[in-house]
C-alpha cells in the first residue's frame, strides 16, 4: 500500500461510483449490439441515461391498492444494490468495504433487493405483477444452489469468501484452467444470465405477459421509482459480469493492492474491455436464441447445478 | 465452582413467579384480571430468567442447586445443575417467554367468554417451568419427568380449542409422536445406564471418553431419533404442521420458538457431551446428522412453499430451520471426530446462533400470525390481503420476521446462515473425500433451501398483507391491542440487535460453550466476525461486519437521495394515486388477483416429483347432449404429504393389521387362558432348567 489507507479507500469509493455511473452504459451497449445484429440501427448507447434522466423528472402514478411496501421498495432495492456494489472489486483488485463483507453478503444484499422487488410486484393487486413475482420466485429459488455451488468451487480453488482476496488470488494465479474452474465457469455463466434477466430466462426487451418476468414486477412503477429500480438492475448486471470476468479471466488485473496508479489504470481499462466483450457476447447470444418456455428453464438450472457439482468432484478427486 | 446464593435465588424467584402465574388466574374470573394475573408474573419471571442465565454465562461457572435425598431414593434426585450450555438455552427460553408473555396479556383476552383464560394461563406457565427444568436437571429420572410434564402441558395447550374435532385429532397425533420420541430418548439413556451403572448425567459425562464404539453409535442414533422427533426432523415431523395450527398462537410461538430448542438442547447434550466423537470412525454419525438436517431443511421448505394456511406454513418452516440447526450440529460432530477443534467450534457456534435466532424470529412470526388470525378471522392466506394498510404494525413486525428468517441482511438470520455456510465451506479440511463430497452436496441442498425460503416468505408476506383484501374478514381487519404489539416489538427488536451486533451473541455462545476460537476480534460488540481459511497455499480471512454494512448502506441511501434530488432539480414529485392498470378489460376484482396457490404454482410444477400434484376438473352441463354450455365448473388441485402417504399410512395400516391378528388370542374362554398360563409356566421352567 503505497499511498496509505485513506487514498486506497477514496479510490475504492470512486470505483463504487464508477460502477453505478457506468452500469447504464453497459445496458446501452448491449442494446446497440442486439440492434445491429438484428440489422437495425438501434438507439444511441447513451439512451439508457436519457431514459433515466427523463424518468427522474416525471411525476408518479401509484396504484390505489398499494401500501407502504410498494412506495419504499425502490429505495430498499437501490440502496442494497449499490451497497453490494461497494463490496465487489470491479475495476481495481480491491474494494471499498472488503473487510466488512464478502461474497455471501453481496448475494444476501442482492437477495434483499429481489425480495422487495417481488413484494412490490404483488402489492398493486394486478395479475401482471403476480405473474412476474411467481415466476421470479421459482427462478430465484433455483438460481440460489447454482450460485452457491460456484461459490463453493471458487472458494475451494482460490481460498475464502472475501472478494478482495478471491480476486487477488485469481489475479495471482492467472487464468486457472483446471477442470473444476471450467465447470464452475459454465455454472456461473448460466446463473448470471438468469440473475440479470437475459435470454433464454427472461426477455428484457418485452412487455408481453407471456414472457415477462422482471419487467412484470415493475409494471406499476413510474417516475423516480422506476428510474431507481431500472438503474439498480443495470448496476447488478455490471457487478455480476465483473465477478465473472475477474474470478475466471483475470487477465490484466494487477496482482497486489499496492500497484501503482499506472498499473491500476491499465487494469481498469482491461476490465472495461473485457466487460465490453462479455456484453457483446451475451447480446449476440441473445439474438441467436429464443426465450425458453418457463418450465424448460428448470433443466437449464439443473445443468448449472450439475456442472457445479462436477466441478466440485473434479476439485476433490 | 462457588454456589452463588444470589443467582440461585434469582432462578428460584423466577420459578415462584411462574407458579404464581399458574395458580392466580385459576381463582380470578374477570376478563382483564385473569389475563394479567397469568402473564404479568410470567413476564417478570422470564425477565429474571434472562438475567439469571446471562449472569451464569458471563460468570463462566456452573451453578448447582441440590435437593437432599436419602440414599435409597437416589433415583429421585431432583437436584439442578446449570452450566453454560443449560444457561444458554435458558436464555433462549427466557427471551422468547418474555415477549410471548407480554403478547399473551392482550391475546388471551380474545378467548374470554369462549374458553377458560385461567386454564390457558395455568398451562402456559406450567409449560415454561417444565422447559426450564428440563434444561436444568442433572439426572435421567428428573429429566424424563420434566420432559413428560413439558409434553403433556403442551398437549393440553394444543387441544385448548377442544370443541373442534380437528384439533383433537391433531392433539392425538402430537401425543403419540412425542411419546414415540420419549421412548427413544429413554432407550438412549438406558443404554448409557447399562454402560455406566448410574443415572446421573455427571457419570455419563465422566464415562464419555471410554464408551465402546457400539454403545456410542446406538446412543447417538437413538438420541437423534428421539430428540429429532421432538424437534421435528423429517420424517418424524408430521405432528408439527398439525399441532401448530390447532394451538393458540402464543402457544405456537412458545412451542416452535422454544420447545424445539429444548429438543436441540437434549440432542447437543447427548451428541457432544455424553458421546464424545473423538475418532474418525465417528464421523459418519455427524454425516448422518448433516444428511437428516439437509433433508429436513429442504422438505420442510418445500411443504411450506405450497401451503396456504399461514400457521401451518410457519410450522413447516420450523422443520426447515431445525434442519439448518442440525446441519450445524452434525458438522460440528464431523469436525470433532477429525480433531478439528476450531472448525467444530465454528459449526457449533453457527448451530447455536441459529437456535437463538430461530427462537426469536419464529416466536415473532407466530405472534404476528396470531394477531393476523385474530384480526382477519381466518388462517387461510387465500382469504387475506390488504392487511398492511389495516394492521400496519403487525405487518411491519411480520416483515421483520420474514426478512430475518429468509436469511437476508441486515437481520439476524443472515448472520447464522453466514456462519453455517462458512462451516460448510470449511469442510474441505476434513481429510476424507467421501465426507468432503457429501458435505459439499449437502450444501447445495442447503442453498436451495435458502432460495426456496426467500420465495416462500414473499408468498407469506405478500399474499397476507399486500394487495387487495380477498374476503370481508380481511377488509374489516383491525390492528391488534397494544400489549400484543409490545410483545412482538420486543422480539422484532431482538432480531435487529442480533443481526446488527453479532458479537454480542457470539461472545455469549463462546463463553457458554467454553470455546475460545479467535472468532471475536475488534472492539466488541461492533467488531467484525472473522473466519480464517487456508487454501491453495494462501491464507485468507472471511469477514462480515454488519455495523459497517449498515453505516455504508446509510451513506449510500443519503447519497442516492441527494443525487435524485439534484437530478430532478429539487422539484417535488407529485404522486397521483390511481387504480391499477387492468389491461383495458374493466375493473379488477378480487378474483383477478394472484392467490397463495397460484403464486406458488411454478414451484409446484418445478418440483412435481416431490409434490405429486393431483388436479381434477368437474363440469356439469345443462344437458347431456350439449357439452358446450356448462352449468358449473370446479377445479381442485391438491399436493400430497409424501411422508403421510408413503410412510405413516402404510405403517399405521400394518400395525392395525398385526393388532387385529393378535386380538384373536383373546377368545374370552377360561380354557384358553388356562392353556396360556400352562404354556408360559412350562417355558419359564424350561428356561430356568437351561440356566447354567
Image (spheres, coloured by chain):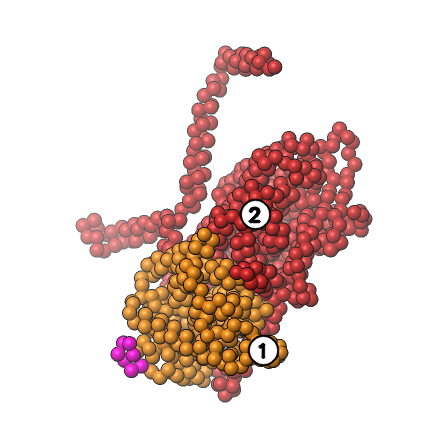
Residue stretch rendered in magenta on the structure = A36-42
Seen in the image, is B345 located left or right of residue A110? Answer: right
Task: Indicate which disc residue B130 carries.
Answer: none
Comparing B525 with A169, the one in front is A169
Residue at the location (30% across, 50% down)? B618
- Chain assignment, label 2: B
Is B579 rendered above or below residue B367?
Answer: below
Chain the render paints red: B
Chain the render paints orange: A
Q: Where is residue B280 in the image (x, y as percent from the top left)?
A: 57, 44
Q: How crowded is mark 1: few (under 14 residues within 10 Å), some or many (20 or more)?
A: some
Confirm whether the magenta stretch covers residue A40.
yes
Q: Is mark 2 on a helix, strand or loop?
A: helix
Comparing B565 with B617, the one in front is B565
Is B217 rendered above or below residue A233?
Answer: above
Q: Mark 2 points at which residue?
A: B334
Residue at the location (70% across, 44% down)? B136
Residue at the location (49% across, 13% down)? B672
Task: Indicate which disc residue A8 carries.
Answer: 1
Amino acid at each position: 500500500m503505497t499511498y496509505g489507507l485513506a487514498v486506497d479507500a477514496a479510490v475504492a469509493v470512486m470505483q463504487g461510483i464508477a460502477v453505478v455511473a457506468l452500469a447504464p452504459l453497459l445496458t446501452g451497449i448491449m442494446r446497440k449490439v442486439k440492434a445491429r445484429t438484428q440489422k437495425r440501427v438501434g438507439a444511441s448507447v447513451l439512451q439508457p441515461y436519457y431514459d433515466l434522466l427523463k424518468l427522474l423528472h416525471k411525476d408518479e402514478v401509484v396504484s390505489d391498492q398499494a401500501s407502504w411496501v410498494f412506495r419504499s421498495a425502490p429505495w430498499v432495492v437501490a440502496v442494497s444494490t449499490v451497497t453490494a456494489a461497494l463490496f465487489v472489486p470491479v475495476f481495481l483488485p480491491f474494494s471499498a468495504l472488503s473487510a466488512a463483507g464478502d461474497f455471501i453478503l453481496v448475494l444476501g444484499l442482492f437477495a434483499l433487493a429481489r425480495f422487495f422487488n417481488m413484494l412490490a410486484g404483488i402489492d398493486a393487486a394486478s395479475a401482471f405483477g403476480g405473474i412476474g413475482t411467481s415466476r421470479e420466485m421459482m427462478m430465484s429459488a433455483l438460481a440460489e444452489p447454482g450460485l452457491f455451488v460456484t461459490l463453493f468451487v471458487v472458494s475451494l480453488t482460490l481460498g475464502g469468501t472475501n472478494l478482495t482476496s478471491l480476486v487477488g488470488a485469481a489475479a495471482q494465479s492467472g487464468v486457472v484452467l483446471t477442470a473444476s474452474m471450467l465447470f464452475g465457469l459454465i455454472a456461473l455463466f448460466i446463473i448470471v444470465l438468469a440473475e440479470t434477466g437475459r435470454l433464454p430466462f427472461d426477455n428484457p426487451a418485452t412487455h408481453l405477459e407471456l414472457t415477462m418476468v422482471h419487467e412484470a414486477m415493475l409494471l406499476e412503477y413510474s417516475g423516480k421509482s422506476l428510474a431507481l429500480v431500472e438503474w439498480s438492475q443495470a448496476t447488478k448486471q455490471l457487478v455480476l459480469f465483473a465477478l465473472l470476468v475477474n474470478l475466471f479471466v483475470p487477465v490484466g488485473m494487477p496482482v497486489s493492492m499496492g500497484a501503482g496508479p499506472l498499473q491500476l489504470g491499465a487494469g481498469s481499462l482491461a476490465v472495461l474491455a473485457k466487460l465490453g466483450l462479455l456484453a457483446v457476447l451475451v447480446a449476440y447470444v441473445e439474438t441467436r436464441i429464443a426465450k425458453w418456455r418457463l418450465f424448460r428453464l428448470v433443466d437449464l438450472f439443473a445443468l448449472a447445478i450439475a456442472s457445479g457439482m462436477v466441478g466440485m468432484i473434479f476439485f476433490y478427486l | 465452582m462457588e454456589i452463588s446464593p444470589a443467582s440461585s435465588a434469582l432462578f428460584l424467584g423466577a420459578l415462584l413467579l411462574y407458579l404464581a402465574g399458574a395458580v392466580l388466574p385459576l381463582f380470578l374470573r374477570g376478563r382483564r384480571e385473569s389475563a394479567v394475573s397469568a402473564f404479568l408474573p410470567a413476564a417478570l419471571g422470564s425477565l429474571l430468567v434472562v438475567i439469571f442465565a446471562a449472569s451464569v454465562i458471563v460468570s463462566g461457572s456452573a451453578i448447582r442447586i441440590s435437593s437432599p435425598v436419602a440414599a435409597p431414593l437416589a433415583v429421585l434426585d431432583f437436584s439442578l445443575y446449570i452450566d453454560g450450555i443449560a444457561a444458554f438455552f435458558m436464555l433462549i427460553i427466557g427471551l422468547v417467554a418474555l415477549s410471548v408473555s407480554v403478547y399473551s396479556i392482550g391475546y388471551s383476552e380474545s378467548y374470554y367468554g369462549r374458553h377458560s383464560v385461567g386454564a390457558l394461563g395455568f398451562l402456559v406457565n406450567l409449560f415454561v417451568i417444565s422447559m426450564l427444568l428440563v434444561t436444568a436437571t442433572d439426572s435421567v429420572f428428573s429429566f424424563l419427568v420434566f420432559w413428560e410434564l413439558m409434553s403433556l402441558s403442551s398437549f393440553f395447550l394444543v387441544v385448548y380449542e377442544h370443541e373442534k374435532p380437528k384439533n383433537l385429532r391433531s392433539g392425538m397425533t402430537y401425543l403419540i409422536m412425542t411419546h414415540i420420541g420419549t421412548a427413544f430418548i429413554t432407550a438412549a439413556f438406558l443404554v448409557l445406564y447399562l454402560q455406566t451403572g448410574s443415572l446421573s448425567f455427571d457419570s455419563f459425562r465422566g464415562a464419555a471418553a471410554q464408551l465402546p464404539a457400539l454403545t456410542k453409535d446406538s446412543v447417538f442414533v437413538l438420541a437423534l431419533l428421539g430428540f429429532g422427533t421432538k424437534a421435528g426432523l423429517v420424517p418424524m415431523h408430521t405432528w408439527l404442521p398439525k399441532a401448530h395450527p390447532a394451538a393458540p398462537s402464543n402457544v405456537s410461538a412458545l412451542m416452535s420458538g422454544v420447545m424445539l430448542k429444548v429438543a436441540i438442547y437434549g440432542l447437543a447434550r447427548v451428541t457432544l457431551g455424553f458421546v464424545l466423537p473423538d475418532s474418525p470412525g465417528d464421523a459418519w454419525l455427524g454425516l448422518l446428522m448433516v444428511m437428516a438436517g439437509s433433508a429436513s431443511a429442504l422438505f420442510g421448505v418445500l411443504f411450506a412453499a405450497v401451503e396456504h394456511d399461514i400457521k401451518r406454513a410457519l410450522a413447516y418452516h420450523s422443520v426447515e430451520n431445525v434442519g439448518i440447526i442440525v446441519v450445524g450440529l452434525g458438522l460440528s460432530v464431523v469436525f470433532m471426530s477429525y480433531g478439528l477443534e476450531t472448525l467444530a467450534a465454528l459449526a457449533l457456534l453457527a448451530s447455536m446462533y441459529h437456535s437463538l435466532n430461530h427462537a426469536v424470529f419464529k416466536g415473532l412470526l407466530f405472534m404476528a400470525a396470531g394477531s393476523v388470525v385474530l384480526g382477519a378471522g381466518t388462517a387461510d392466506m387465500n382469504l387475506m390481503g390488504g392487511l398492511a394498510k389495516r394492521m400496519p404494525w403487525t405487518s411491519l413486525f411480520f416483515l421483520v420476521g420474514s426478512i430475518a428468517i429468509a436469511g437476508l441482511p441486515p437481520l439476524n438470520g443472515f448472520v447464522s446462515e453466514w456462519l453455517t455456510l462458512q462451516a460448510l465451506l470449511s469442510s474441505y479440511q476434513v481429510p476424507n473425500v467421501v465426507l468432503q463430497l457429501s458435505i459439499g452436496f449437502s450444501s447445495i441442498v442447503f442453498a436451495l433451501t435458502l432460495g426456496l425460503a426467500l420465495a416462500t416468505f414473499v408468498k407469506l408476506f405478500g399474499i397476507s398483507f399486500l394487495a387487495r383484501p380477498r374476503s370481508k374478514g380481511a377488509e374489516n381487519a383491525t390492528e391488534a391491542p397494544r400489549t400484543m404489539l409490545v410483545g412482538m416489538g420486543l422480539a422484532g427488536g431482538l432480531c435487529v440487535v442480533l443481526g446488527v451486533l453479532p458479537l454480542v451473541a457470539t461472545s455469549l455462545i463462546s463463553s457458554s460453550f467454553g470455546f475460545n476460537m479467535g472468532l471475536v476480534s475488534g472492539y466488541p460488540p461492533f467488531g467484525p466476525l472473522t473466519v480464517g481459511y487456508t487454501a491453495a497455499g494462501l491464507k485468507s480471512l472471511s469477514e462480515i461486519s454488519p455495523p459497517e454494512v449498515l453505516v455504508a448502506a446509510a451513506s449510500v441511501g443519503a447519497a442516492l437521495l441527494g443525487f435524485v434530488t439534484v437530478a430532478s432539480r429539487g422539484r417535488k414529485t407529485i404522486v397521483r394515486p390511481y387504480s391499477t392498470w387492468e389491461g383495458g378489460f374493466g375493473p379488477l376484482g378480487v378474483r383477478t388477483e394472484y392467490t397463495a396457490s397460484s403464486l406458488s404454482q411454478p414451484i409446484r410444477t418445478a418440483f412435481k416429483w416431490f409434490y405429486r400434484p393431483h388436479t381434477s376438473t368437474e363440469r356439469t352441463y345443462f344437458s347431456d347432449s350439449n357439452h358446450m354450455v356448462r352449468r358449473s365448473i370446479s377445479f381442485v388441485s391438491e399436493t400430497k404429504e409424501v411422508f403421510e402417504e408413503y410412510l405413516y399410512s402404510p405403517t399405521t395400516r400394518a400395525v392395525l393389521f398385526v393388532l387385529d391378528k393378535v386380538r384373536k388370542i383373546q377368545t374370552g374362554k377360561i380354557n384358553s387362558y388356562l392353556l396360556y398360563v400352562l404354556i408360559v409356566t412350562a417355558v419359564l421352567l424350561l428356561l430356568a432348567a437351561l440356566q447354567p
